[in-house]
Image (cartoon, helix red, strand yellow):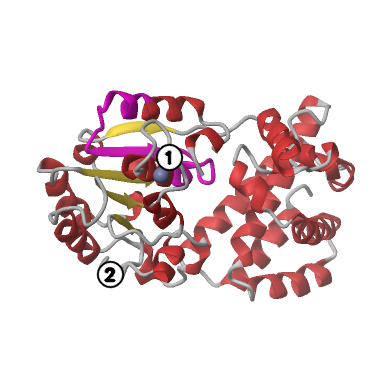
Amino acid sequence: MSFNNILGQERAKKILINSLIKGNISHAYIFAGPEEVGKKLTALTFAKTLNCINGKEDCCEECLSCKKINSLNYPDLIIIRKGDENTKTNTISDIKRNFGDENEDKDKESKSIKIGAIRELQRRLSLKPYEGKRKVAIIDNAEDMIAASSNAFLKTLEEPPGETVIILITSNTHSLLPTVVSRCQVIKFNPLSDEHIKEILIKNYKFSENDASTLSSLSKGRLGSAISMDYKSFCMFREDALKLLGSSIKGDLKYVFTESKKLSSDKDKLPQFLDLVADLLRDAVAIKGIGTDDNVINKDVSDKIKEFSSGLQIQNILNMIDKVQQTKSLLDRNANHQLAVEVMMLNIAGGYR
Ligand SMILES: [Zn+2]
């Protein structure tokens, strides 16, 4: 995708395009902002434009170099992220995995960027470009660099090899070493407005007005999330969450225990479930507090939210949100899943009595 076709993020694009026009390219950038707002796409487009044979301020998408980068098979493009031991085997499947689903990395070991990957990156950056004008290294989820990796990486930033551009992608600049941040040009990426996402979904993805409106509020400013969301499965999942919340508030403990057991056996879905429950409770607060659906994320089920929360006070619901957040941090610390979920739902059941 060329800059011209990337939707939103006008400010970030403008800064990069201006530096391409002026030939004033930094050795290192940090693309900072929430998940799924276009940081990776922009990094790849920047890498393409830097190496494009035809374009200067935007890539042509036609030349060999653009095509190779599009297929993630370009020797002067190095992509690393958590779980990579080194960057030697930059095969297409490796790189596709690198830009794939976050949830693929299950085990704890794989949740960091290891020093081996950084050393291999340094080795590869020290070589001349194979066929491109510039070597581009993209470090995804840069906040996952362990301390040793960050320190090793700092050396690369202090003495950047010529004709190299390094792009760190992160949703949390604060977790990077200040010495790393100070050596990079930080480019901020912002969540898009619901209206903007809705407009894009209708215009570019041919969604109906109604679906676009629902998806845009569910996406929380992340266009990538709106586009990739399996809306039908999400609705079924949300129905389950609404039913469990409703049953819990009514005190139907038999249902709560059965469903909590089912839920906690699916470790992948559990964090999504907790986020969803927190969103639904937050929506209940918004409806009660403001009296309209204007600030509600799950607008399309606002009737059901009103139903389960009808007998609750705002403070009751805020306490429930607290319990959900506590459960999330318990699970991060490897607590017993079933017990944690049961206790949370029982707390919700007793939360307003
Ligand atoms: Zn090109």
Q: Residue at x 45, y 41 (%)?
A: 60
Tell me, yes or no, if residue 315 can be seen here. no
Crowd around label 1: few <14 · some 14–19 · many ≥20 (10 Å): many
Q: Is residue 27 above or below residue 241?
A: above
Q: Amino acid at mark 2?
A: Glu
| Element at label 2 | loop
Percent coordinates x, y for residue 122 in the rendering: 16, 56
Tell me, yes or no, if residue 327 can be seen here. yes
Q: Amino acid at mark 1?
A: Cys
Q: Is residue 60 above or below residue 152?
A: above
Of callouts 2 and 1, the N-terminal one: 1
Q: Is mark 1 within 8 Å of ligand 1?
A: yes
Residue under pointer 1 = 59
Q: Quadrant of residue 73?
A: bottom left
Query: What range of the chain is rendered magenta?
Result: 18-42
Task: Report the disc number at residue 85.
Answer: 2
| Element at label 1 | loop
Q: In the image, 64: left or right of 122?
A: right
